[in-house]
Amino acid sequence: MPRDKVLIVGVGNELLGDEGLGVHVARTLLTRTEPLPSHLEVLEAGTALLDLLPSISHYSRVILVDAVRAGRECGSVCSVDLSSALDGSPKFSLPASLHQWGLMDTLRTGRILGLLPGSISLIGAEPEIIAPGVGLSPKLAMAAERIISLLLADLP
């Protein structure tokens, strides 16, 4: 696989409402009628964070999409460059992870194993409802649309 490709990874548990944000974004991108640019690939990872490490090592850039608890207004979209956070900043942490094995734990493991690309970032939104159920709240559905627009605008 060529290293000049960009991978968008949808992370989350779709059985817990807004926690499934990344999965919904990935599925929407994968089922678009218009084809994605040839340098762009999408992976629906769900909650299998450790399982995705070998896959992401083949890309020059990885963008993770996930629900992020950052104490902001529900539906607020945020973006974080994780590359520099993983290089010599052990105290850096994302706002509360919604996964049993945290995203930063997984990425630090990937860094130790030499499996991370040069550029890795996170785009996410503040969840409204994290409870058993399928589907996104209206605020997160709108945030998902904004995230998709941002991703496609940034990766023409």
Image (cartoon, rainbow, N blue to C red):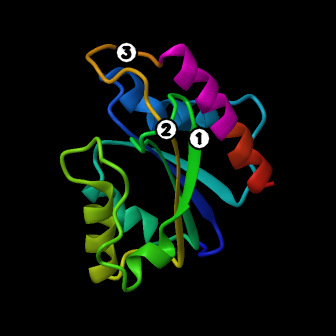
Residue 69 in picture, x, y percent from top left: 39, 41
Residue 24 in picture, x, y percent from top left: 50, 29
State how many labels appear.
3
| Marks 1 and 2, the one that precedes in the sequence | 2
Q: In which quadrant of the rendered image does the C terminus lie?
A: bottom right
Q: Give the label on residue 77, or none.
A: 1
Q: Secondary structure at mark 3?
A: loop
Residues 120 and 78: in front is 78
| Marks 3 and 2, the one that precedes in the sequence | 2
Q: Is residue 66 magenta?
A: no
The magenta segment:
137-147
The answer to whether the residue labelled 3 contacts the one labelled 1, judged by CB atoms less than 8 Å apart, is: no
Q: Give the label on residue 72, or none.
A: 2
CA neighbours of label 2 inside 10 A, class few (<14), some (14 to 19), many (20+): few
**According to the image, label 3 marks what residue?**
134
Residue farthest along the bottom direction in this orientation: 88
In this rendering, would 106 be left or right of 144?
A: left
Q: Amino acid at mark 1?
A: Val
Q: Amino acid at mark 3?
A: Val
